[in-house]
Image: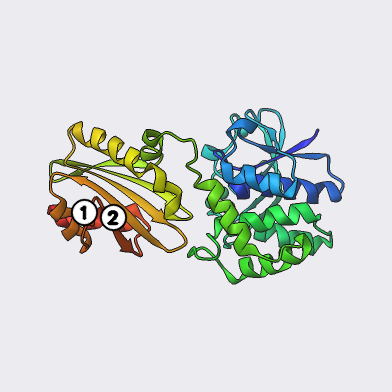
Amino acid sequence: MTICVVGHSNPDTDSVTSAIALAELMKAQGADVKACMQIDAAGLNPESKMVLDRFGLATPEELRDAAGKKIALVDFSDIAQAPANITSAEVVTVVDHHKIGDITTNNPILFRSEPVGCTGTVLNKMFKDAGIKIPKNIAGGMLAAILSDTVNFKSPTCTPDDKAAVADLKIVAGIKDTEELFMAMLKAKSSVAGVPAKDLLFRDYKDFDMKGKKVGVGQLELAALDQVADIRDDLLKEMKKVKADGRHSVLLMLTDVVKEGTDLVVISDDPALIETAFNAKLSGTSMWIDGMMSRKKQTVPNLQKAFGC
Ligand code: MG
Ligand code: MG
Ligand code: MG
């Protein structure tokens, strides 16, 4: 029976390229195996799509139901993130870099998990250990996954092993400029072209209760602020509509991932209160806040303090 290698649901680039890479490694070791993913090809996220295109990698087959199948897992080991009926499948291999999940097996299996930034980093070691050369295009995909998972080495999850793996894979893939690759991935991921302003505002949006006042906070992660230059007025219009629907304030974080800061757009009954919250001054309807990247860890706590929560 063909082994299906599959990453977690709602797959990221690591889950997609690691399925391809592990399938290649197992195939080179004589297994009957194919790369799969838990999504139809049309629904693949724009970053992963761009990575597959750039390196000429075939899109993995869709896998929804694991019942009765032989399965190898990459980038997860939780039942909740697995295809349907994983408990009636035979899991034969796990390669991961997360906490160990709740998948169990009846037989001993190859289980390799390391506390590194990306499954691609673990797979690079596995190819080395096996003495098997990584095909050039697959090395490109693995390198892209490491840049994605470690946010170009800036994430606290990044380890020296991830940097070492990128150094290896650069040579195999013939990639000189990883910055250029990371920026191209970021642009694909943060693409706003052709997306209605309303959808952008709600792409990553949450309402909060601030001492009885409803405050909405959306966030768009961008490679550069000029990506939204032409649609600022449309975004403001949508924010005003959303505010008119019973909210004290609506904020939109336009986060520049490269400059590591946020242009915070504010529509509020009390703009001065929002200025106080972030110790900054609005110029028109927005203010630049250096270092602001996280809604959960930075924006919301500051608002809560200002609102007296
Ligand atoms: Mg992942
Ligand atoms: Mg990962
Ligand atoms: Mg990830």
Mark 2 element type: helix
Q: Is residue 121 left or right of residue 207?
A: right
Where disc 1 sits, the SS reads: helix
- Please tell me in which quadrant of the rendered image residue 146 appears: bottom right
Relative placement, left or right, of 128 versus 265 is: right
Q: Is residue 278 above or below residue 207?
A: below
Asked whether 283 or 56 is in front, the reply is 283
Of the numbered discs in the image, which one, if any, rests on residue 299? Answer: 2
Q: Is residue 108 above or below residue 68?
A: below
What residue sits 58% from the left and 46% below the top?
47
Q: Which of these two is toward me, 27 or 244?
A: 244
Residue at the location (79% across, 40% down)?
A: 33
Q: Quadrant of residue 261?
A: bottom left
Find residue 304 and report its horizontal and vertical position in percent: 19, 53
**Mark 2 and mark 1: span between their CA atoms?**
6 Å
**Residue 27 picture location, percent across and down:** 83, 46
Which residue is under mark 1?
303
Residue at 72%, 65% (x, y): give it.
170
Q: Are marks 2 and 1 in contact (CB under 8 Å)?
A: yes
Q: Residues within 10 Å of mark 1 (few under 14, many from 20)?
A: many
Q: Residues within 10 Å of mark 2 (few under 14, many from 20)?
A: some
| Residue found at x 23% / y 58% | 302
Residue type, mark 2 in image: Thr
In the rendering, which numbered label is found on residue 188? none
Q: Quadrant of residue 1?
A: top right
